[in-house]
Image (tube, rainbow, N blue to C red):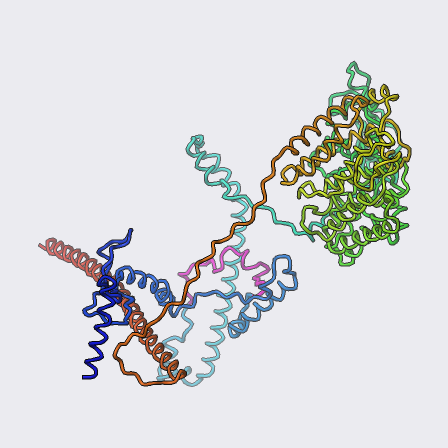
Amino acid sequence: MGAKNKRTNSDAVYAKKSAKSGNKNPFETSKEQTATKGQNAFDIHVNKEKFQILGRICKHDRGMPGVSRAKALQKRAQTIGKQYAVKNKTNKFVDRRIGKHLSGDQLTESVMNARFLAEKMSQVRASNKAERYNLNDDELLTHRGQTLEEIEQYRDERSDDEELDDEGLDADFTSAANFGGGDEETAQDRQTAIDKMILEQKRRKNEIAKEKDEVYDLTEKLDANYKLLLPLVAKATKDDQAPKPPPDAYDKLLKEMIFEPRGSVSDKLINVEELAKQEAERLEKMENERLRRMKADGEEDEKDAKARPKHRSADDLDDGYFVAGDDDEPDDTLAYDLDGNLGTHLNGKTNKVQSDKPGDDEEDDDEEDGEEEEEEEEDSDDDSEVDNLSDLKESDSESDAEAAPEQSATKSPKKKSSTSIESKIEDTTIPFTLKMPKTYEDFTQLFDQYPQPGQQATIVERLIKCHHPKLEGVNREHVVKLYSYLLQYIKDRFEDASEQDIGKNFKLISGLMPHLYDLTQLNPLRMSSTLLEVIKEKYAAYRKNHKIYPTLDTFIYFKLVANIYSTSDFRHPLATPTYIFIQHILSRARVRTRQDIGMGLFLVTIALEFGSLSKRLLPCVFNFLQGVVHMSIPKRDVEQVEIPPPFETIGPLSKLLAISSSTAKESTSLDGQKLQAEDLVTQTVTLDFRVRALDTSLCLIRETMELVAEHPGACYLATPFLPLLNRLPLKLYPVHVHQHHKEAKELLSQLAEQKQKRLAPAERKPKALRLLEPRFEAVYDDKRRPKMSKAKEERAKLVHKIRREKKGAIREIRRDTAFVQELKLKQILQSDKERHEKVKRIYQEASMQQGELNELARAKKRKKF
């Protein structure tokens, strides 16, 4: 009664709730739903429940059994099916060679030898018994002085029908000896008869062997004579043959297709070590050739002089051909040369007879020069190897000399430029193989021997090639030493350099720049640390007096960093400190002289190189350009124009570049010029420098603003320039300054007028409403469970999970077994089908054969009758 009362009470409670919620069952989960878009309604299976059970959630009320089964079969085919297909098969190759993890460059000859030896030993262990009787291992078998490969026929040429005589005992002798027949003498002296028979058999064998040798010798002689007659027979048969018709288009096309190459073999790729060795060998060969030419001008070796043919008359009988004569005897023989010109040959030199052709007088008669002999060899034989330094990086002098066309060789030497000839002669004097200088004094002494920038660049290039790190391990230290020598040499050249030397020094830097880059790539860590130490030293010296601009030898290292290293990186171990060094100089050093302005503009150009790719510029660059324009504005003593330091607002330095109205005629007549070398070393400010400085500043302003035009804050950088440019007295400057001023002002005005976007806070996600925790009600399912502790309850849940997973695993194993059995059944059915086909084909062939036999039997019966 108590249970019934509880049930009725609970039903009454839920009846009230259902009435409030509109008579809806909250546990109804098996309600049919419409099929989703893209699915076939007939593939969806709905599992209907007979009774609604409270508290039970049905997860599989809807499903697609066909699709699930197809996916399961496909998954089994890709896993178990693949494993079943390769079952009991050992067709897997495992690379167990020595050094299998090494790359192509690391596979040395020792590794290959070890790999070959291991393979040999494995073969010996595998077939040790067969190796004992192997006679073909590096052995050459011969027969009568000839190898077996040279012998055409290995068997005896005699007829196989020849049979030896019966060497057995006679029937008469056997019957007499064994059965007592025959004469009494035979029976009495049996031993004597046997000895006589043995002697007779030996005699017969010797005669037969002698006959065989004679026949063999005659056969060999006949074969030799026949081989001598074969060419005559073949020639006669060829002459007797009828001429073949000419091939038609089809035959030609067929032969072309037969002999057409299938593919071209590509050249083997040369690694860095082999390339360095080849380059060193080539330079050594060229050095030997140069030394040979330097021994004497126009002299020849005795061997070449003796080998030269002498003049002989037409009736000479060659009596004194081998008698050594005087090589200096003149040969005035009149003869024609290859070009058809008439002349005499004096010791190999051609003196042409005067002709009416104007081109004959323009040829050079001096053939004792080694370089001109090489040019003649190049014209006569294009395939010959000539020392033209094509593999080396050409300097300006070499490129000018080699860029001239071949027709210029026939022109008069007066038309050739003297500089190209001198550079060519100087370049040939440079050795092709050089030793690495041990000290810096030796290095400077080597450079002093060849003062031209192109020659010094060639020397550095050949030093790098002769001491490449791939050739020897000690060369790693040599290239680092060479790099430090070059940095020190550049510092010495630019330190206290005059205005005449600055241009030459910059040409040297442009020639050495590619080689400095190559040295940096050989050992980037060591080279970068070396240059960084130099820049640190320069910065320490600058900090002692930071209000004075450093000398030019410091700025040239900034130029090296800008050209060799990547300045677009966000952080660079060498470019970033250099960039900060430039910022300190431009923002702290005072501008008082012409040299300071030139140095500052030079630093601005280097800063533009640093920021050309990254679009990042230093604030001091804009500040310095504003200061140069500020100094070009004429101001009264009382008037002040605001300008940030290190420029002065008042005083004579505030108008250092200003032009007075008294020099207007001179200033307006000046031509456009760039900054010159004297601006980096001269202290006095001149009129032409004032014009050049302002003109250069206007061009740099335009370039800097073009770089930062895409930045959102470009208007704030462009605005301070406009009032300064408006105050410039343009009437005192030439026309080209007006043009640059107009271009810079238009760009600045365009950037200053750009509207900026208003700052707005970042969009935030809307804050979610605060939700209260729901009130859960315990559902009574009328199941009596024993009360357990928390640990036991967790264990019971785990056991329940294990049992459920075990059932699922058993179910999957059954399905996998059924799948494998199906594969086996398919394989058996396939083999049975093939066997039935073969048996059927055999029966068919047998029936056809039996039919043919029956037909033959019937034909024989007809013939009998």
Which residue shows up at 35% across the image and 63% down it? 75
Q: Position of residue 281 (x, y in %)?
A: 75, 49
Which residue shows up at 77% across the image and 33% down it? 697
- Asked whether residue 144 is drawn in magenta, I would say yes
Front residue of 575/604: it is: 604
Left or right, 416 with reference to 616: right
Q: Position of residue 522 (x, y in %)?
A: 73, 52
Front residue of 232/133: it is: 133
Can residue 368 be seen in this snapshot?
no
Whether 827 is drawn above or below 802: the answer is above
Q: Quadrant of the N terminus?
A: bottom left
Can residue 223 be seen in this snapshot?
yes
Q: Quadrant of the C terminus?
A: bottom left
Q: Position of residue 441 (x, y in %)?
A: 90, 50
- Asked whether residue 303 is drawn in magenta, I would say no
Whether 448 is drawn above or below 540: the answer is above
- Magenta residues, start to end: 137-164
Left or right, 480 with reference to 445: left
Left or right, 808 with reference to 164: left
When asked about the image quadrant of residue 317, the answer is top right
Left or right, 841 with reference to 170: left
